[in-house]
Amino acid sequence: MAGRTTYSEQAKARIYVVLTANGGNIKRTARETGVPESTVRNFKREFETNPPDTEAVEVEVSSGDYVSELEAARNDALTTLRNKIPTMNGSQLGVVFGILEDKLTRARGLATERTEHVHKLPSADELALAGQMLAQGAIEAAKQRQQELIEADVHEQPALPAGLR
């Protein structure tokens, strides 16, 4: 019976990059890396709590074969498609390019989504209304305080001794 295969940190980093590029698809990752599905599944589970070494992933992304192969596949596909333009419409070309570009983006660890935050200042009418509400609240608070002062008991304090004045 053959022994278990052990994987180096760099091999795990490659599997991680391919798995990320494939959006977590275990079967596709196993097919592209030649690693058994069960192993990829186990690594995926492991990566959820303990991702591979960041430096190993960066090395794989910057100088690894997978990203280079993806770039070459994208470029070859576009060249081939460009030569077949009479039979290929623009949307088909866009789909192929988009899929390959998305895969490269994920493999490089770049953001695939963008969240836009819009900050809006209040309009002049909203500011005027807020000012009126603030002024009205201040007037009400002042009236309440004045009423409290009127209802307060007055207590005279004894005079200070002559030496302390």
Image: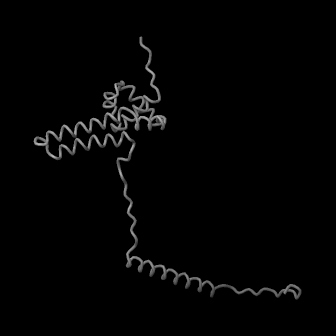
Name the outermost residue toward the left: 86
Q: Is residue 123 above or below residue 27?
A: below
- The percent position of residue 62, horizontal first and vertical second, equals 41, 38
State the residue in front, 45 or 148: 45
Q: Is residue 3 left or right of residue 152?
A: left
* Residue at the image position 39 percent from the left and 42 percent from the top: 109
Quarter of the picture holding the C terminus: bottom right
Q: Is residue 138 above or below residue 22?
A: below
Q: Is residue 152 above or below residue 19?
A: below
* Residue at the image position 39 percent from the left and 31 percent from the top: 15
Q: Is residue 36 above or below residue 21?
A: above
* Residue at the image position 41 percent from the left and 79 percent from the top: 129
- The percent position of residue 27, horizontal first and vertical second, equals 31, 30
- The percent position of residue 163, horizontal first and vertical second, equals 89, 86
Counting labels gives 0
- The percent position of residue 76, horizontal first and vertical second, equals 24, 36
Q: Is residue 152 left or right of residue 99?
A: right
Q: Is residue 154 left or right of residue 135?
A: right
Name the outermost residue toward the right: 163
Quarter of the picture holding the N terminus: top left
